[in-house]
Amino acid sequence: MAGGRRKPQGPRKYKCTDPPCLHIVVDERRGIFKVFLEDYDGLIIPIPADTLRRACSGLSEAKGLREASGDEVDYLARRYLEAEPKEEEEW
């Protein structure tokens, strides 16, 4: 069916095996979608699509940089978000 809409195949199952997970849930029959964040506790948090678009734009601006790891993550959270990061053991 080239160029046409996909035939709905029934509800897709969303499973988060390595949290946190972003889910983009689509209901083609109703013509709607929503972005959800699933956290380490299994909480499902709706996220406005514009928020995700801005985050993706920011990610593209970080091109050429490496992702922070270890103590660097804590540093960035404290310095720029004024937040105390949760330790992985607490998740």
Image: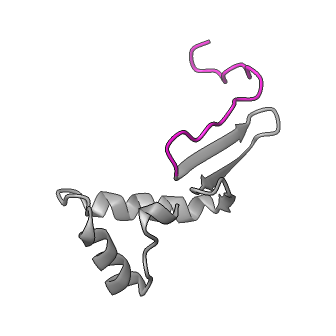
The residue lying at 76 percent from left, 29 percent from top is 11
Q: Is residue 78 left or right of residue 66?
A: right
Residue 80 appears in which quarter of the rendering?
Answer: bottom left
Q: Position of residue 37 (x, y in %)?
A: 60, 55
Choose between 48 and 3: the one closer to the eye: 48
Residues drawn in magenta: 1-19
Of 45 and 89, nearer the camera is 89
What's the residue at 65%, 53% (across, down)? 42
In this rendering, the answer to whether 64 lies above or below 83 is above
Q: Position of residue 81 (x, y in %)?
A: 41, 82
Question: Does residue 52 appear left or right of residue 43 in this picture?
Answer: left
Asked whether residue 23 is drawn in magenta, I would say: no
Magenta stretch: dominant secondary structure: loop
In the image, 71 versus 25, the foreground residue is 71
Image coords of residue 18 (percent x, y): 49, 43
Vertical order, 12 against 43 (above or below): above
Q: Is residue 13 magenta?
A: yes
From the viewer's perspective, tell me whether residue 55 is left or right of residue 61.
right
Q: How many marks?
A: 0
24 relative to 7 in the view: left or right: left
Farthest residue to the left: give it: 64
Q: Is residue 29 above or below residue 50?
A: above
